[in-house]
Amino acid sequence: MLTKTGLIALGAAAAMLAACTPQAPTALAAVNDKVYTVTPNAMKVKAGIVTGEVTDMKVTERVEDGTGRVTEPAKLTGKLSLKNTSSDQTMRLVGGKISYIDMQGKPIVLEDNRTAPIIQVGSGYGSSDRLDPGQSSSQTLDAEFPVAALKAKNLKEVRLELAFIPSQFREETLNFTVSIGGQ
């Protein structure tokens, strides 16, 4: 009986040790960036009193090696530069949005679980939402990109819709005639 009890205790101890033994680490699949070139990768356009330029455009998604599973959906990145070309109007940038247009001129919608890309202006430290005549500002562009637009010959254009408030810009000089003492 004692032997039987000892064997049961020994078996229980062995089971506990086996359960506490650390598992061998499993190898994680490597995740790499899949980069799609945007042609042209830089573009400059003018609309009204604003000139916009987007440079270094590319689309990147993160894909797991071996399985091809997308771990992070596609994003459009680049640098957005805006310039106020007016000689007498200040523009206060309110915001903007990005839309993707297909070959038939219709918007390509994002998947249900993704947020429509917007442009935040003046949100960084030291940045301003106001552009005086001749003034420029730059910011990075990092926007969700629709999977449907990754298919060959499906994307016609990237549309940037800006909202701004123009106002007259004037500089005036005030001269105060003064004298010192009794002069």
Image (cartoon, helix red, strand yellow):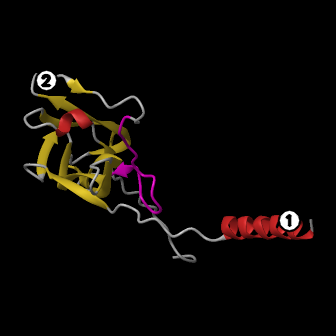
Q: Nearer the viewer, mark 2 or mark 1?
A: 1
Does residue 112 lie above or below 129 as drawn? Answer: above
Please tell me how crowded label 2 is: few (under 14), some (14-19), or many (20+) other residues with Cα within 10 Å: few
Viewer-proximal residue among 130 and 162: 162
Res. 49 mark:
none
In percent of width and height, residue 64 lies at: 31, 55
Q: Circle 1 sits in a helix, a strand or a loop, which is it?
A: helix
Label 2, on which residue? 105
Q: Nearer the viewer, residue 170 or 1?
A: 1
For the stretch drawn in magenta, the main secondary structure is: loop
- 10 drawn magenta: no
**Left or right, residue 40 beside residue 48:** left
Looking at the rendered image, the quarter that the N terminus falls into is bottom right
**Residue at (20, 47) in percent of width and height:** 52
127 within the magenta span: yes
Residue 148 on image: x %, y %: 22, 33
Mark 2 and mark 1 in contact? Answer it, CB < 8 Å.
Answer: no
Looking at the rendering, which quadrant does residue 14 occupy? bottom right
> Compared to 96, does 12 lie above or below?
below
Which three-letter amino acid code belongs to the residue tagged 2? Gly
Query: Number of numbered discs present?
Result: 2
Badge 1 amino acid: Lys
Q: Nearer the viewer, residue 127 or 54?
A: 54
Judging by the rendered image, the residue that carries numbered circle 1 is 4
Magenta range is 116-131
Decide which of tag 2 and tag 1 comes sooner along the chain.
1
